Image (tube, helix red, strand yellow):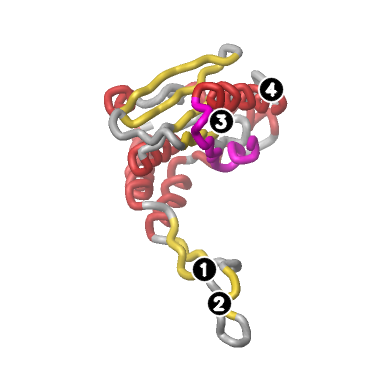
Amino acid sequence: MKKRNSSLKAAVIVLFFAFLTGCVSVQTGLYHDAEGDVVAAHNINYKPSSSYNMLITGIKMSGYKKNYTGDAQTIIAQTQKYNRGLRQLPPNAFYSRFNVTETRVNDHPYFLISPKQNARSDKIVVFVYGGGFLLGIDFMHWNAIERIVTDLSVPVCVPLYPIYPETNLPAAITFLDEVFAQLHEAYPQARIVGMGDSSGSCLF
């Protein structure tokens, strides 16, 4: 148990520095035609930065990916155990640093997290976290949300959509549709921007 706690602590430290410094750098984004003229910005060649490599190392050390190994019943049992250890609420520090409001749709919450000062009113980001439709939101997602709110000064909506085995994919999409509808009604002039990772991005 002591060895496992030490490994987890090391993983958290590595992930913290990865998020602190960013995740990837672009080496080049342009290519040229036969005459040497720039013709497009396709075929972007991404060169992983050191912080991105730190992020991948931290995820491996945390054991996060092990939740998806084994047969179906094993994966379900592992992910449910993992979820029981998650805090399905914004971190405590959010409530002092930002304006945090909670709204419920069909007994599931979504949080609107806004800067306390100089918040933009023309855009709202809806952040839908990933987790294979099995795992809940975790500290890596909250760290990303914190950076978006802090660096861009935009409100971020975080819907805690229902995951397996409580519900199915159509029910999760219905929940998100209602969240978007409520946001549009409350902020008709704002541009609503969808953002997500992994399975979360599939829900857009």
Q: Quadrant of residue 77?
A: top right
The residue at which mark 3 appears reads as: 135
Residue 131 appears in the picture as rendered: yes
Which marked residue is nearer to the observer: mark 4 or mark 1?
1
Closer to viewer: mark 2 or mark 1: 2
What kind of element bears circle 1?
loop
Whether tag 4 and tag 1 are in contact, CB under 8 A, the answer is: no
Whether residue 82 appears in this view of the structure is no
C-alpha gap between disc 4 and disc 2: 46 Å
Label 4 vs 2, first from the N-terminus: 2
Which mark lies nearer to you, 4 or 2?
A: 2
Looking at the image, which residue is at 60% across and 68% down? 43
Expressed as whole percent of the image width and height from the top left, the position of residue 11 reads 38, 43
Q: Image quadrant of residue 105? A: top right
* Tag 2 residue: 38
**Sequence-wise first label, 2 or 1:** 1
**What segment carries the magenta color?**
187-204
Q: Which mark is residue 70?
A: none
Q: Which quadrant is home to the N terminus?
A: top left
